[in-house]
Amino acid sequence: MTGNDLRFGFAGLGVMGVPMARHLLAAGPTTVWNRTASRADPLVAEGAARAETPAALLDAADLVGVCVLDGAAVRELALGPNGFVHAKGKAGKVIVDFSTIAPDQARAIAAEMAEHGIGWIDAPVSGGVPAAEAASLIVLAGGAEEHIARAHPLIDLVSARLTHLGPSGAGQLAKLCNQMIVANNMMVIAETIAFGRKAGVDVTHLAAALKGGFADSTPLQIFGPRMATHTVEPKLGGIGVMLKDLLMAAEAAADAGAITPTSSHTIDLYRSVAERGGMSLDDDISALVNLFDDQGA
């Protein structure tokens, strides 16, 4: 089957999933599924087909992408009562999971899917919503080389680079390394913006002033200006999601016998959001600046 003949599928139409599915739709026949069915309406209006169940989604597609919140949601999609394993034409299909879940969950799901003849790739991504919209995500992949080779037509439509890091679970471990850096960086950016504001710096120009220097980063350029102006819409990522990933990283570090004192302290700061009046773990990550602007952490 040639690339032009491929049928794509996508499950999980959140802030990341919608633009990713839209790229697939622009390239060929695409079927979508979401737990809240109405989230699929805009894509259906643009020409996507709607699947009633994950099993029906896999039946309608050759390659399927997944981007959902956590391991429980991934497992339900894959192995639940209406999951992928119940598809009639599942044998030989390949599923690419772009979600960030625990490495041991990824390994277990891949093994169970293999028993049903389904290829499974753990392929968490970096770059956030802007990269999803620009089809420039960075993909960190774990799984069998043959499955990754077959999945390239889908992955290439949403990404700028794929790195195959090893067997199932390897992609998730690499993503946790990524998230440790990002989560700590986000908190330091928030702390710095609040400090600069209180010290009299015009923080609306700070990210631009630091661009290209050693302090620069993509998160600084995207979220620094938002924190400087207390901009939280459109939502680019939730505080609670970042905490979830940090907690998974802490668990994986404990399993590996690694010490992570910086991330441990940062976890406490993220947790404090839930105790701070006027803040919520559902808030956009840009709202972290309020931890330091309001009354200190």
Image (tube, rainbow, N blue to C red):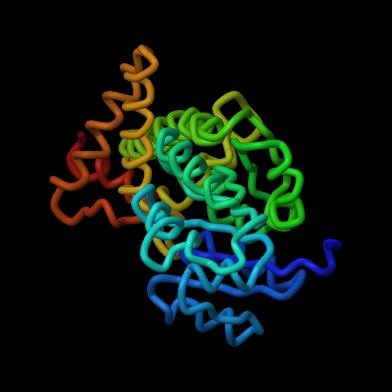
Relative to 251, 103 lies left or right: right
Q: Indicate the quadrant containing the N terminus: top left, top right, bottom left or bottom right.
A: bottom right
Q: Report whether residue 197 is seen.
A: no
Q: Check the image and report above or below for 86 versus 216.
A: below
Q: Check the image and report above or below for 116 versus 86.
A: above
Percent coordinates x, y for residue 238 in the rendering: 37, 53
Q: Residue at x 55, y 35 (%)?
A: 168
Q: Residue at x 42, y 38 (%)?
A: 186
Relative to 9, 185 lies left or right: left
Please name whichever residue, 237 or 187, is drawn nearer the observer in this view of the structure.
237
Please name whichever residue, 34 or 61, is drawn nearer the observer in this view of the structure.
61
Q: Report whether residue 248 is seen.
A: yes
Q: Residue at x 59, y 30 (%)?
A: 167
Percent coordinates x, y for residue 111 in the rendering: 50, 40
Q: Residue at x 66, y 73 (%)?
A: 30
Residue 36 appears in which quarter of the rendering?
bottom left
Marker count (numbered): 0
Percent coordinates x, y for residue 151 in the rendering: 71, 51
Q: Check the image and report above or below for 178 versus 229.
A: above
Please name whichever residue, 41 or 90, is drawn nearer the observer in this view of the structure.
90
Relative to 155, 181 lies left or right: left
Q: Indicate the quadrant containing the C terminus: top left, top right, bottom left or bottom right.
A: top left
Percent coordinates x, y for residue 166 in the rendering: 62, 28
Residue 35 appears in which quarter of the rendering?
bottom left
